[in-house]
Image (cartoon, rainbow, N blue to C red):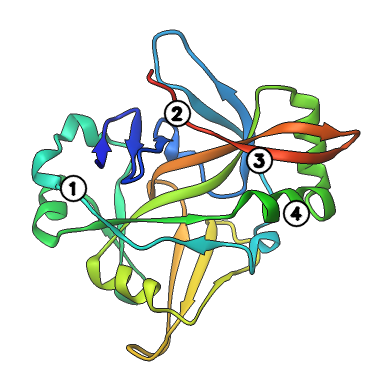
Amino acid sequence: MVEIKNSYFKDPFGNRYFRRNSSSVSVGAFGEKKEPWTEANYLSVDGHMRYEFLDGKLKQDPAVSIDWNGTSQADIGTAVTSYFDVGGVLATFDTEKARKAQLKLVRFHVDANPLENVLNSQARTVRDQMKDEGNDARICSSAWVVVSAELGQRFATATAIKVEATTTQGLKITAQGGKTWSGSESIVLGAGTVFAYGLHKVKKWDGERVEDLEDDWQSLN
């Protein structure tokens, strides 16, 4: 069952994603996972790999419907201030609008093996910094964002998903039109747009290279 709390988002498969500090996190962000005693765990962002390294590797899942009527403002929190609509519109998010417009959540992510290859072959500086950080090093591998129903459908039926080069605003994702719609739709994962995020950690090193990555899910706190 989907569940929204101010510290985590649980998807339909039971996976719990981080929510604290989501305004600073997007796919490719890396840093130290903080585990405060009395607050939710979160990623303290040190930097971001070059966005173009993710081109051709980023995937998206089908949009997830949310029972906004059964979700309180306290659970939603204040980190997310915007949602994406068709035509590149970044609209103001609030619970009333979410309920009336039946806004949805969609996840953009990169799988462990492609991410591992990027760290070993392209983003070596990021890899080396994670190695120096030690066991607390994490990298963001997925991000949930709020979208209108129509935009979610357009991304779901796109013929291709492209990640564009580094921008000063954030990670830019463009969907190319398919049979049911033409043109393109772009969103930029900037401040106030990421609802929740997932992390990976290095399970095993082979010298300076990453040998194995694994998911690191949000815990009960």
Dot 1: element:
loop
Q: Nearer the viewer, mark 2 or mark 3?
A: 2
Q: Is 198 displayed left or right of 151 in the figure?
A: right
Q: Which residue is mark 4?
A: 118
Asked if the residues shown at circle 1 and circle 4 are in contact, with their CB atoms under 8 angstroms apart, the answer is no
**1 over 33 or under it: above or below:** below
Q: Quadrant of the C terminus?
A: top left
Identity, as a three-letter code, of the amino acid under mark 3: Gly
At 30% from the left and 53% from the top, the residue drawn is: 82
Asked if the residues shown at circle 1 and circle 2 are in contact, with their CB atoms under 8 angstroms apart, the answer is no
Q: Earlier in the sequence, mark 4 or mark 2?
A: 4
Circle 2 residues within 10 Å: few <14, some 14–19, many ≥20: many
- Residue 206: quadrant of the picture: top right
Q: Which residue is mark 3?
A: 47
Dot 3: element:
strand
Identity, as a three-letter code, of the amino acid under mark 1: Asp
Query: What percent of the width, then of the height, locates residue 107?
Result: 42, 55
Query: Distance from label 4 to label 2 (Cα)?
Result: 24 Å
Report the disc number at residue 106.
Answer: none
Query: Distance from label 1 to label 4 (Cα)?
Result: 37 Å
Query: Distance from label 1 to label 2 (Cα)?
Result: 25 Å
Q: Earlier in the sequence, mark 1 or mark 2?
A: 1
Q: Is 116 displayed left or right of 208 in the figure?
A: left
**137 over 120 or under it: above or below:** above
At 56% from the left and 50% from the top, the residue drawn is: 27
Dot 2: element:
loop
Q: Residue furthest front?
A: 13
* Residue in front for this viewpoint, 22 or 136: 136
- Residue 130: quadrant of the picture: top right
Asked if the residues shown at circle 3 and circle 1 are in contact, with their CB atoms under 8 angstroms apart, the answer is no
